[in-house]
Image (cartoon, rainbow, N blue to C red):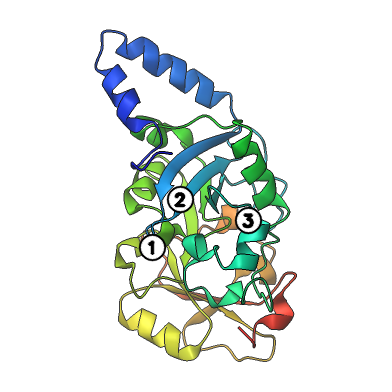
Amino acid sequence: MSTGLLAGRTELDKFGKSSNNQLTKGYIMDTLSKSNGVIIYQGPSKLDGKPIVVVATGLTKTSANGKTGDMVQTWILRADIAPHEAIKTGDDESICGNCPLRGINGKERACYVVTHQAPLSVYRAFHKGNYPEATHADLIALAVNRMVRLGSYGDPAAVPTQVWAMFTQGTKGWTGYTHQWATASDLKPYTMASCETEEDRAEAILQGWRTFRVKTDDMPLLKNEVVCPATTVGLSCEACGSCKGTTGQAKGTIVINVHGYGKKHLKAA
């Protein structure tokens, strides 16, 4: 298992110093360009040091997700435990941190992600060896002129920030959210601070974050909040692109009513 920034980086960088550098680079990029999914990080979680893997998918195939649109997805997973099992044991802390939507060992879970669906599919494909590994240089070229979701499942704070910095460098834009905003200030340019309470939102704004709040249907809007246009006018995340942290021109804070399989548990969360 790799413990560096990217799996295989040391050997590839060493090999890249040889006279076959251009041939090696061409072979790697040709392989990556044909794959719909690529490993962009494999190593310790920044949250608890346990092994995680990040896989970017949708690189060659169009996404059918109507809410997000055709975006490159990134899946942050425990590398050694299937996601639907990790939520039952609490091992999802490695990739979700202190997110209150996790529930307790899979119970009263308010998160909209159904772990035995897309996350499990990606996890199984990873263990079958279906995804090639990217190097530092590859990251910048993987999603050029595409919109990217940072953390389709999992919190971007579990991953070294420089991975996101390189991966988003050539993109058209991105969306991202973190519940670790109190301790992950380096993510401000890339993610929104995920908040559920008025107090958390106020504190995050005070710390310089833009916020994204999930509320129940009966909770009121707060000052300077804008309702997510995906729910008001059907604008996809790909077309909107507002939830990219403090980068760009967007200044407001976003709110959305809780949705998905576990929405009944939001108050408990």
Residue 42 in the figure: left or right of residue 22 = right
Distance in Å between CA atoms under marks 3 and 1: 36 Å
Q: Position of residue 175 (x, y in %)?
A: 50, 57
Q: Is residue 120 left or right of residue 90?
A: right
Q: Residue 239: x, y in percent?
A: 58, 54
**Do we see residue 243 in this rendering?**
no
Q: Earlier in the sequence, mark 1 or mark 2?
A: 2
Quadrant in the rendering for residue 50: bottom left
Which residue bears the numbered disc 2? Answer: 51
Secondary structure state at the residue bearing disc 1? loop
Figure quadrant of residue 181 = bottom left
Label 1 environment density (alpha carbons within 10 Å; few <14, some 14–19, many ≥20): few
Residue type at mark 2: give it.
Answer: Pro
In the rendered structure, which disc, 3 or 2, sits on the residue that comes first in sequence?
A: 2
In depth, the one of 240 and 51 nearer the eye is 51
Q: Which residue is mark 1?
A: 249
Density class for disc 3 (Cα within 10 Å; few <14, some 14-19, many ≥20) is many
Q: Which residue is mark 3?
A: 83
